């Protein structure tokens, strides 16, 4: 295992708009997430949590500072290369799940792999493995509206996990789930990290942040506090 | 103090030696309440005096088996049947500390922030202990209780911060 972080934010700032309307969503944030590490991000609404995640995954670009994913500074990448890196290395789970209603659970999970250029047969096998991992093999053929909210959430997670993505970014993935289902979601993220992925998890639930190796508290776009990493006695 | 009632509950399962009671007490409550063997024997001899337990003969190693009496069973049932009164619980130092910080017009925010990091750390450790735990349901429920308490404390700290930020009194002081 390499000791380079899977993702590094170095002095990253993000300002939205300009002039008197400018909003500093993130100010000089530096953060490394290593392979195997689950880092929780907490903070009041508007403190910059989603901005941090979007920058870490290359969905948004910083105003200043650098984001490095798997050793590659994102500032140097063309739009096409950035899109390719995102697809290969980064899995996202958003608050609104973004499942495509006209595709089955399996097809939703296959989609990012097909975009990667993986052949259909293999994409399907990988999707089935990912659905199996989240305990949903039996609903693979159903459409999003034919499964429960908790199951939809897990499909979205399977989609983020498919194809060995090493950086998982999850923005309130436990959304409106009840406690046992939310615990299942954390169990899955934790297992992926224990298997070598790096994850950033935004949550406002202390009980879910409790699963993390390290908890970072954001306030007004800056890191206000952070717990020390638990020694890796996992 | 619930040591004696706890010991009675264990003895209701059958006669036991003092050292067994200590081990079973800790197995049920986890690391939350370590007992030393001296406490166990002191409590047993008081319970014997009060007629709640009866000692058997000493065995050749000088050990004594204790048995619960009818009065002991009644005491245990009374305990299970009575809710714990709020006033019987120890005071929470954090609550007092924050109230005093506000009263003394100290800067409360660093107190809240330091506590938030410490409590989160506790929550991480508890969550890890729970994941690694192969213990029975009693110990698991004790861990859950500690997790819920840490969680509640974390929410309360957020609440304190929000209230103090909104309060004109504290804002004046800061400016
Ligand atoms: N596209 C945008 N345009 C303007 N302001 C934005 C935009 N996105 C976020 N912001 C502002 O940046 C700050 C941080 O937002 P966000 O990262 O969404 O916070 P959080 O996820 O912690 O609630 C907020 O003040 C928000 O209003
Ligand atoms: Mg957000």
Image: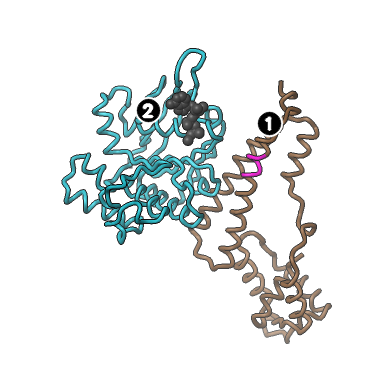
Residue A84 pos. (x, y %) = 25, 33
Q: Is residue A162 magenta?
A: no
Q: Position of residue B9 (x, y in %)?
A: 68, 75
First to last magenta residue range: B155-159
- According to the picture, the residue beneath numbered tag 2 turns out to be A60
Name the image colouring. Answer: by chain
Q: Is residue B65 left or right of residue A25?
A: right
Q: From the Cβ of disc 2, is ligand 1 less than 8 Å away?
A: no
Chain that is cyan in the image: A
Query: Can residue A29 be seen here?
Result: no
Q: Position of residue B100 (x, y in %)?
A: 78, 38
Q: Colour of chain B?
A: brown
Mark 2–mark 1 CB contact (< 8 Å): no
| Residue identified by numbered label 1 | B166
> Residue at 26% of width from left, 24% of height from top?
A78
Q: Residue furthest top?
A: A19
């Amino acid at each position: 295992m390499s000791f380079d972080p899977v993702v590094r934010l170095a002095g990253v700032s993000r300002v939205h708009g300009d002039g008197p309307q400018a909003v500093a969503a993130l100010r000089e944030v530096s953060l490394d997430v290593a392979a195997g590490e689950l880092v929780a991000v907490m903070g009041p609404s508007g403190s910059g949590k989603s901005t941090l995640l979007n920058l870490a995954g290359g969905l948004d670009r910083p105003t200043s500072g650098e984001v490095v994913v798997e050793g590659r500074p994102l500032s140097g990448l063309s739009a096409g290369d950035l899109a390719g890196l995102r697809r290969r290395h980064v899995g996202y789970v958003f608050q609104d799940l973004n499942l495509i209603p006209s595709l089955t659970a399996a097809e939703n999970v296959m989609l990012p792999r097909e975009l990667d250029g993986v052949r259909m047969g293999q994409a399907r096998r990988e999707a089935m493995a990912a659905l199996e991992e989240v305990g949903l093999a039996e609903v693979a053929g159903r459409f999003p509206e034919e499964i429960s909210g908790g199951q939809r959430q897990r499909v979205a997670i399977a989609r983020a996990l498919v194809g060995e993505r090493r950086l998982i970014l999850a923005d309130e993935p436990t959304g409106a789930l009840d406690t046992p289902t939310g615990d299942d979601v954390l169990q899955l993220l934790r297992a992926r990290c224990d298997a070598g992925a790096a994850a950033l998890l935004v949550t406002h639930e202390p009980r879910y942040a409790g699963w993390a190796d390290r908890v970072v508290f954001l306030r007004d776009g800056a890191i206000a506090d952070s717990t020390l990493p638990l020694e890796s006695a996992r | 103090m619930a040591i004696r009632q706890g010991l009675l509950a264990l003895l209701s399962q059958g006669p036991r030696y003092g050292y067994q009671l200590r081990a079973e007490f800790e197995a049920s409550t986890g690391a939350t309440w370590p007992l030393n063997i001296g406490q166990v024997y002191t409590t047993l001899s008081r319970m014997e005096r009060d007629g709640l337990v009866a000692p058997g003969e000493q065995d050749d190693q000088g050990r004594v088996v204790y048995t619960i009496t009818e009065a002991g069973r009644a005491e245990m049932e009374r305990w299970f049947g009575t809710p714990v009164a709020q006033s019987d619980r120890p005071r929470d130092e954090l609550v007092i500390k924050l109230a005093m910080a506000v009263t003394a017009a100290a800067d409360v925010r660093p107190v809240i922030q330091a506590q938030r990091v410490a409590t989160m750390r506790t929550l991480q450790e508890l969550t890890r202990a729970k994941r690694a735990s192969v213990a029975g349901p009693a110990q698991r429920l004790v861990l859950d209780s500690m997790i819920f308490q840490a969680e509640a404390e974390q929410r309360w700290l957020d609440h304190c911060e929000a209230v103090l930020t909104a309060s004109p009194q504290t804002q004046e002081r800061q400016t």
